[in-house]
Image (cartoon, helix red, strand yellow):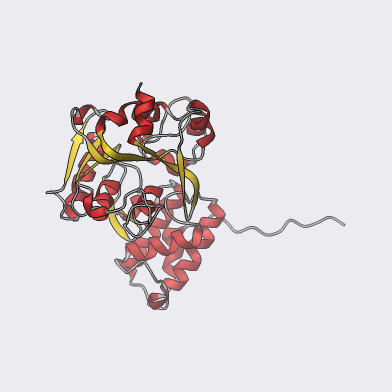
Amino acid sequence: MKTQPLPQLPPANPRKEILELSTLRDVLRYAISVFERAELSFGHGAGGALDEAAFLILESLSLPIDDFNPFADARLTEREKHLLGERIALRVEQRVPTAYLTGKAYLHGVPFRSDARALVPRSFIAELLQSPFFNGEGDQMALVADPEAVESVLDLCTGGGSLAIMAAYAFPNARVDAVDLSPEALSLAAENVADHGLGDRVTLLEGNLYAPVAGRTYDLIITNPPYVGREVMDALPPEYRHEPAMALDGGEDGFDLVHHILSGAAAHLNPGAGMLCEIGEDRDVLDAAYPETPFLWLDTANSDGEVFWLSRNDLAALAR
């Protein structure tokens, strides 16, 4: 007996099909189904189709993003359906990151403008700055014992400025210099700095790594530089190809800029200071390149050893 093929749904048409729906709960269910069938990549802040669909709906409708339930049974207007249908369609058809569709991303509840001028804000450093390592609530594990004593911070490869702004909040007495090579990214960073009212404390500088801050020293350096290797760059999901390649591409093994950052850091750090750097999942490559360097690898809720800390003294040994 010949087996009959299972029936298949035709391709989704979000712009049309969403007009048949009524409530936010209906749209959430629909978007999850469409996202799952499209096998999207969710590497820009959401943990999966449910989180991404909920964020797209709530942010698009200017609703609080922390709880979907109070609005689940609210009915949508035709105008709202058209907006959500278009964004769901673009997310699936062109694989545009949701943060670019909504124009907004959040790091630990802090909002930032987001568009194709810079990477979608996402860094484990943001979580670490709010942790006992840096928030003054640690003891022997603290890397910064007193956040209020930090008077100067350098953020290298700032992109849209999210980490510079997070540092300004974490260290209330600090002036933050934020450096990037891309004028487009810095234009977005300027908008974010203005949104947060930090123009008097965050200075944006265009240039290559330490060049714009020659002669200056800091109590802390933070950096989330490009660290994607050539093989991974060639295999990136479509979502990442909407982002500026220069903000991702770290050369053959991913660490071209990291080597430059390490070699120049000590000259820009005050005594007792240190550097926090995110490098992704290839810590073994860095450990092999610097076998005598005592990297302190820091874990977060969603990462295992993707960020390291080095003191000024340890970095000075690399500069010799």
Which quadrant would residue 180 be assigned to in this image? top left
| Left or right: where 201 falls relative to 244 | left
The structure residue drawn at horizontal position 43% and vertical position 26%, both measured from the top left corner, is 251
Relative height, residue 109 to residue 164 (above, below): below
Q: Which residue lies furthest to the right in this view?
A: 1
| Left or right: where 267 falls relative to 293 | left
Q: Nearer the viewer, residue 242 or 3?
A: 242
Q: Which residue lies furthest to the left in this view?
A: 200
Q: How many marks?
A: 0
The structure residue drawn at horizontal position 41% and vertical position 59%, both measured from the top left corner, is 15
Confirm whether residue 194 shows in the render.
Answer: yes
Q: Which residue lies furthest to the front in this view?
A: 140
Relative height, residue 93 to residue 247 (above, below): below
Confirm whether residue 123 shows in the render.
Answer: no
| Left or right: where 149 falls relative to 238 | left
Q: Position of residue 29 (x, y in %)?
A: 50, 67
Which quadrant would residue 54 be assigned to in this image? bottom left
Relative height, residue 174 to residue 186 (above, below): below
The structure residue drawn at horizontal position 36% and vertical position 73%, both measured from the top left corner, is 76
Q: Where is residue 78 in the image (x, y as percent from the top left)?
A: 34, 69
Q: Which of 76 and 314 is in front in this view?
A: 314
Q: Where is residue 265 in the image (x, y as percent from the top left)?
A: 31, 31
The structure residue drawn at horizontal position 54% and vertical position 34%, both measured from the top left corner, is 284
Picture quarter with the N terminus:
bottom right
Picture quarter with the C terminus:
top left
Which quadrant would residue 204 be assigned to in this image? top left
Q: Nearer the viewer, residue 185 or 215?
A: 215
Q: Nearer the viewer, residue 292 or 234?
A: 292
